[in-house]
Image (spheres, rainbow, N blue to C red):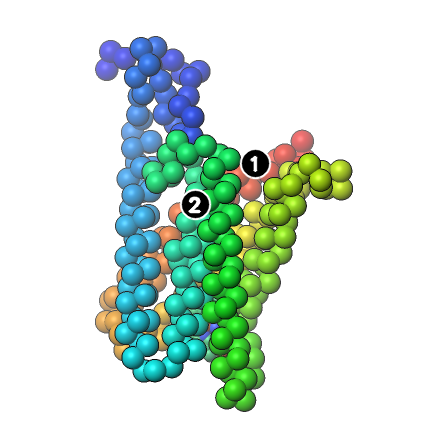
Amino acid sequence: MGVDIETSMKVTNSSTTLVSKSGQPVVTAFQRTLWVLNTLYYVILGIVSLIFLWIFCDLSAINDTQYTLHLILSTAAYVPLMAVAIFVFAEDNVAALYIPRTKRYSIHGILLLISCVAASIGMAVMVVRKSENNRSHFTSKHGKYGLASWVLLFASVLTGIFAANTRFFSKVFRPVILKLFHNLLGLAGFAMGIAATYVMVNHLRNSLSSSALTGMKVGLIYVTIWSAVYALKSLYGQIKGVFS
Ligand code: HEM
C-alpha cells in the first residue's frame, strides 16, 4: 500500500522478500505462508521428537539398555538431527534466516556427523543384541530399511566430502555431479530411515492411544516432506545443471 517495490532487489537468504525503494522489506502473502508452515514444522518436529524421547525413556525402565540405546540413538539420528541438517539450507527457514551459506554448510556438516555417529551406534547395539540372542539379522522390513538407510547415508557423506572439496576433486568429477549425488543419496537415506521408524510406530501402542499413534505418523510425514521439499528443489536445479 503506497510502497514502491524495487522488484530487482532481494534480501539475501530469502526467496521471496522484496525491498522497496525506501529500503523497507516488503513481505508477500506467500512469504508469510512459508514462515507459518516453517514455524509449524519446528513445532511438529519438537513435539514428535519429545514424544519419542519421553516414551523411550519410559521404556528404559524395562532395564534393557541395548534396546533403549537403539531406540534413542537411531531415532534421534533422523528426527530431529537429520531433518534439521537437511532443512538448514531452506532459504525461508525461520531458524536460519540471514545465516550465510558458508556457515550453513558447517551447521549441516556438524549435525550430519552427530547424526551418522548416533545412527551407527544405535544400529550396532541392536545388531549385537540380536547376535547375543542368536537371532538372524536384517530379516524384518524395519531392519532392511534401516540397513539400506545406513549404507545410503555413508555414500552420501562420502560424496559430500568430495563436493565440499571441489578444489581437489573438480578435475575428476564435475562439482554439480558430486552435489547431485550427495543430495540424492542423502535424501534416499533420510527417506529410508524415516520409513524404518514409521513401520515401528505401532510398536509404541502400549504407550500411546490409537489417535496419538496416528498423530505421530502424520507428524512424521509432515516433518519428512517439509524437510525434503527444499532439497528436492535444489536437486531439480542440479539435474538442470548437469544437462546445461
Ligand atoms: C520407533 C523407533 C524404533 C523402534 C521401536 C525400533 C525397534 C526395533 C526392534 C524391536 C528391532 C529388532 C527386530 C527387528 O530386527 O526388526 C530393531 C532392529 C533394527 N532397527 Fe530399529 N527401532 C526403531 C528405530 C530405528 C531406526 C530409526 C533405525 C535406523 C534407520 C533402526 C534400525 C534398525 C536395524 C538396522 C535393525 C536390525 C538389526 C539386525 O537385524 O541385526 N531402528 N529395531
- Earlier-in-chain disc, 1 versus 2: 2
The kind of residue tagged 1 is Gly
Disc 1 target residue? 237
Disc number placed over residue 194 in the picture, else none: none
Residue 199 placement (x, y as % from top left) = 42, 69
Q: Residue at x 52, y 73 (%)?
A: 124
As drawn, 215 above or below 24: below
Q: Nearer the viewer, residue 54 or 181?
A: 54
Disc 2 target residue? 87
Residue 2 placement (x, y as % from top left) = 24, 11
As drawn, 239 above or below 43: above
Residue 196 placement (x, y as % from top left) = 46, 67
As drawn, 62 above or below 160: below
| Badge 2 density bin: few <14, some 14–19, many ≥20, Cα 10 Å | many
Q: Report, in whole angstroms, how far the alpha carbon at label 1 lies from the one at label 2.
A: 17 Å
Residue farthest toward the right in the current orientation of the protein: 172
